[in-house]
Amino acid sequence: MKIVLTQAQYNLLIEVIKGTSSCCTLLSSKEDEVCVEMQEKDIEDAIDWLVYELDIEGFDANDELTPKGKILEPLIDILENI
């Protein structure tokens, strides 16, 4: 499936799935827009890892989104709604 992400979302996705069995193929990149392709199973696995990362680093002591959480939350939404 083709997915359009911001550069920040793409960078974070690659950081989180690095070392896992999930695979993401870069199709194109221009300015702040990146197009990638992922298989459904890889998307499901990536969502699991991204949610885990959001739980660990996505919120501060006041339950407000951290800068990383502000990237993770919409990225998870994009992948869940494909």
Image (cartoon, rainbow, N blue to C red):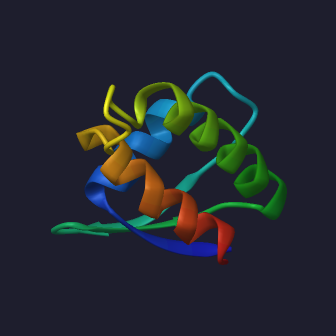
- Quadrant housing the C terminus: bottom right
Q: Position of residue 68 (x, y in %)?
A: 32, 39
Task: Give residue 29's position: percent from left, percent from top.
Answer: 30, 66
Q: Quadrant of residue 81?
A: bottom right
Q: Nearer the viewer, residue 28 or 49?
A: 49
Q: Nearer the viewer, residue 14 or 30?
A: 14
Query: How far across and down, in percent of the image, does residue 33 sit?
Result: 28, 70
Q: Residue 28's quadrant in the figure?
A: bottom left
Q: Residue at x 62, y 33 (%)?
A: 52
Q: Where 70 falls versus 81 (above or below)?
A: above
Q: Residue furthest front?
A: 62
For the point 59% across and 34% down, the residue is 17
> Which residue lies at the image location 58% right of the left edge and 42% below the top edge?
50
**Where does the image place residue 19, in percent across and percent down from the top left?**
63, 22
- Image check: 5 left or right of 18? left
Above or below residue 52? Residue 43 is below
Q: In this image, 6 relative to 72: left or right?
A: left
Q: Tell me if 36 is positioned left or right of 39 in this view.
A: left
- Residue at (33, 45) in percent of width and height: 65
Up-down: is 55 above or below 41?
above
Q: Which residue is the extreme one toward the right?
A: 41
Position of 76 relative to 54 (above/below): below
Q: Quadrant of the N terminus?
A: bottom right
Q: Nearer the viewer, residue 58 or 62?
A: 62
Q: Quadrant of residue 79?
A: bottom right
